[in-house]
Image: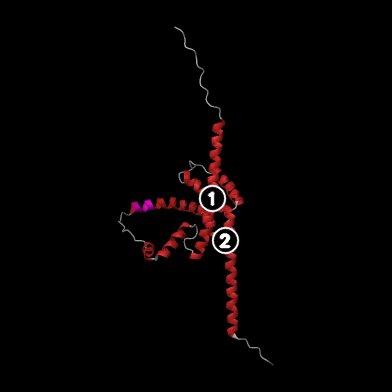
């Protein structure tokens, strides 16, 4: 019987070629999805969808704040606009998921702070020892990093959910996040122009104040 022998060199070469083809196909799919996302943020339909979600979010914002811990004024409007943007992204990106989950994390942190504040006050009153200022190890490491790595770290902090991500993920998320922010600016400026135009038209349609009629001088 003839024995079938396999060459390990040819097998490794075929495996490498398959991996390269698979990697190239994944890169093409990622590029196509990125291009679709960028085109989606530039479309008028997506801007209208975001504008409707923004109006719904702003209608639920109370500028005075029901509680002292709630954000007030411009901060509340900004958070509502970011949440509407993340909802419009449908959680497909890392930054949109980070914005949506950040609200829940803030609630848990506030509860922990309220619980820990009472324990901290009791601990401070019980022990009056002076503590030495601690130097953060992360600050020392950040000073010794090269300039490129420092810039990548700063970019990862600016994009939500990308603080500890590698450079390719940060760049992919940053490009989509910037396109979404540009669409947000267009939608909010159009909404501001619409509101200012409606206010000006209502003021112009109001009748002008009438002056009292002139009376003839009385003869003495």
Report the span colored magenta.
120-124
Is 67 placed left or right of 21 in the picture? left
> Residue shown at 59%/63% (left/top)?
32
What's the CA distance linking mark 2 and mark 1? 18 Å
Q: Is residue 11 visible?
A: yes
Task: Give how far across and how far down residue 115 sits, in percent.
Answer: 44, 51
Furthest residue toward bottom? 1
Q: Nearer the viewer, residue 146 or 143?
A: 146
> Residue shown at 54%/42% (left/top)?
193
Residue at which label 1 appears? 184
- Mark 1 residue crowding within 10 angstroms, few (<14) / some (14–19) / many (20+): many
Are the residues flagged by discs 2 and 1 in contact, CB closer than 8 Å?
no
Figure quadrant of the C terminus: top left
SS type, badge 1? helix
Q: Which mark is residue 83?
A: none
> Residue shown at 43%/59% (left/top)?
154
Q: Is residue 166 visible?
A: no
Predominant secondary structure in magenta? helix
Lower position in the chain sequence, tag 2 or tag 1 = 2
Task: Give how far across and how far down residue 190 sits, in percent.
Answer: 55, 45
Residue at which label 2 appears? 34
Does residue 95 lie above or below 191 as drawn? below
The image quarter in which residue 201 lies:
top right
Q: Nearer the viewer, residue 124 or 153?
A: 153
Assess whether residue 86 is covered by the magenta stretch: no
Task: Give how far across and how far down residue 72 sits, in percent.
Answer: 47, 44
Figure quadrant of the N terminus: bottom right
């Amino acid at each position: 019987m003839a024995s079938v022998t396999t060459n390990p060199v040819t097998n490794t070469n075929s495996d490498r070629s398959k991996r390269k083809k698979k990697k190239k196909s994944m890169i093409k799919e990622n590029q196509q999805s990125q291009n679709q996302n960028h085109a989606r943020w530039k479309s008028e339909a997506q801007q209208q969808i975001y504008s409707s979600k923004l109006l719904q979010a702003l209608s639920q914002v109370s500028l005075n704040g029901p509680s002292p811990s709630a954000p007030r004024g411009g901060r509340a409007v900004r958070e509502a606009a970011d949440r509407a943007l993340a909802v419009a992204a449908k959680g497909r990106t890392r930054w949109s998921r980070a914005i949506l989950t950040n609200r829940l994390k803030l609630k848990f942190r506030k509860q922990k702070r309220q619980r820990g504040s009472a324990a901290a006050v009791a601990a401070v009153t019980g022990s009056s020892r002076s503590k030495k200022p601690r130097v953060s190890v992360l600050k020392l490491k950040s000073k010794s990093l090269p300039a490129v790595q420092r810039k990548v770290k700063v970019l990862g902090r600016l994009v939500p959910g990308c603080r500890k991500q590698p450079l390719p993920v940060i760049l992919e998320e940053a490009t989509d996040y910037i396109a979404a922010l540009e669409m947000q600016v267009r939608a909010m400026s159009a909404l501001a122009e619409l509101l200012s135009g409606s206010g000006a038209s209502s003021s112009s349609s109001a009748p002008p104040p009438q002056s009292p009629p002139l009376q003839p001088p009385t003869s003495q």
